[in-house]
Structures are given as structure tokens and as C-alpha cells.
Amino acid sequence: MTEVATSDQLLVVIDPVARRTDGESVRIAKDVLSAGATTKVCLPDSPEEFARVLSRRGSRRPVVIGDDRALLRTVALLHRQRELAGCALSVVPVGAAGVLSLARSLGVPTGAVAAARAVLEGAERRLDLLVDDSDGVVVGAVRIPAIRGPAGAGEVVVGAEADASAHAHPWLRTCQSLVRTLAARPTRGARVTPVPGPGPSRLRVEVDGVTLVDLDQPVEAVTLTPGVSGGARVEVRPVSVGAEASPLGAVGRRVTVSGADFRYRADAGVVSGPVRRRVWVVREGAWGLTLPG
């Protein structure tokens, strides 16, 4: 790990969802950071303003107060600005428990005081990143095929759909909730047909040019996870016929998935696709996160 100077000037960006969810934790984190460093506090009200504030940070070290969605949004923005490699990012997780799992898995303390102190006294750890051939980034994992329907417990929804929902006016969110409830309620006397889950996929999965599974072997799921000694861990679960089939695994720097149209979910966010081919490449030490020393 690389030591982070406590005298850094900080740009503290407070996600609006965090302000609404747990204003007390936001206030505590802001007070701890302001007492230990020179801070500029920003309160963006939209994803566009969030991006604008981040791009105008100058030499200040960015500190995001928010949930996993805010962290992922920040990583993606800095990547698109080609400033991720030279930026030591810090995060103070604030939000509902179900959308703080990524920060926790990366080693960030989940308490407001402990996380803020880690920003001031911690060290920068360089982390790997998966970048696909459409310039999308993955911090946590890619899952194929994507889970149908809305995100479940512990999943994070990011992107335009999530931003629109998160920043909508309260009356609009109430109307949206009512519409979803009425749409999901079956008409009296109507037969309800269960919606099947995702079926087996026929995909070719190649790791560093070596075929791990081919189109003649249907699979239930494929998972890619960065951060294994500069490589990505790939796990393929073949369809079970009779006895349960053992998963296939490999570690490599370049993963290519191709075949029939498939969808995927990166970082448990919005579903992407359908696509017939996607390539993910590991960028070793592509971004830095401040963690307890």
C-alpha cells in the first residue's frame, strides 16, 4: 500500500441518495473529514452535476459519501475522463445495508467515523479493473446470463434507470410504485402463468485464447471476477445432466464470451445486451482506493 498524506485537500462529494437515506451519518462523516483536512464540500443534485463537480476537482483528492452506486458511478466517470489511474479515490459508505456490500468487500469500514478516519489516515491500495470492448468497467463481478427482473436483495442498480429513480421527486416515486403494484396485480379470474427464469446458454468462453467451454456444452452461468494476481477468475457452471456437473475454472487476463445473443450484469447493476460477443481485459492496478493502513 502507498501512504496517503493527511494534509491533502479533499473534495467531499455527498451523493443526494445518502443525504436522504441517512443524513446523520453524512453529517458525522463531514465533520470528521473537515476536522482533519482542508475540505471543499459539494452537494450535487443530479448525475450530470455529480460528473461536473468531479471533473472540476483540480488537485483535490475526491471523497465520495454514498453507497455502492455512488462508488461505481465515480469509478466509471474517472475512467471515461482517463483520470482513474492517477487518482486516489476515497469513499465513506452511507446508505441502506443492501447497497453497501461492494464497499465492504473491498475493505472499506462501514461506520461513518471509521471510514472517515480511514480517508484521513489510511493508505492507497491499487486494485484491478475489468474493462470491456465497449469501454465499460467492472469493479466487482460480471454474471452471465443476467438475472431476469429487478435487482433483488443485495444487488446494486446503477445507470440511467437507477439515477432517474433515485433523483425523482417523492410524488413521482409514489406514482411509479403505485403503477408497478397495479401492473403486478392479476385481474380477478385470470390465470397467472409463471415466468420462467433464464434457460441454459450456449456460449464459447475463451481465457487468454484457450477455450474453456464451447458452444456444444450448454451452461447455466458464467462469472468473471477481477483481482486475482493481475488476472480475472472465470467460473463456468455447465448444465447438470443427472449428477451435478462440476464448475470449470480458469484465471487469465483476457476473457472472450461469444455465441447466441446473451445479456450480462456487471457489478450487479443494470442488465446489458443482448450482444453476441464481449471481451473483458484486466487492467492491473488500474485504480486506487484509500483503505485502513
Image (cartoon, rainbow, N blue to C red):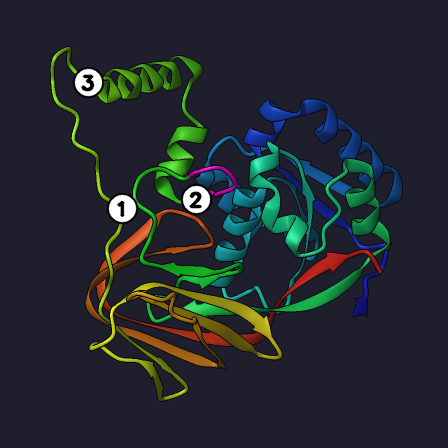
Task: Provide the secondary structure element on which disc 1 rests.
Answer: loop
Spatial CA distance of label 2 from label 1 is 22 Å
Sequence-wise first label, 2 or 1 = 2
Task: Provide the secondary structure element on which disc 2 rests.
Answer: loop
Q: Which residues are magenta?
A: 152-157
What's the amino acid at mark 2?
A: Val
Q: In what quadrant of the picture does the C terminus appear?
A: bottom right
- Predominant secondary structure in magenta? loop
Sequence-wise first label, 1 or 3 = 3
Spatial CA distance of label 2 from label 3 is 29 Å
Q: Residues within 10 Å of mark 3 (few under 14, many from 20)?
A: few
Q: Residue at x 43, y 42 (%)?
A: 157
Q: Nearer the viewer, residue 117 or 47?
A: 117
Magenta-drawn stretch contains 156: yes
Kindly identify which numbered label has been placed on residue 158: 2
Q: Is residue 169 above or below residue 203?
A: above
x, y percent for residue 240: 32, 65
What's the amino acid at mark 1?
A: Gly
Magenta-drawn stretch contains 274: no
What's the amino acid at mark 3?
A: Pro
Q: Is residue 246 above or below residue 271?
A: below
Q: Which residue is mark 1?
A: 197
Q: Is residue 135 above or below residue 281?
A: above
Residue 38 in view (yes/no): no
Residue 35 in view (yes/no): yes
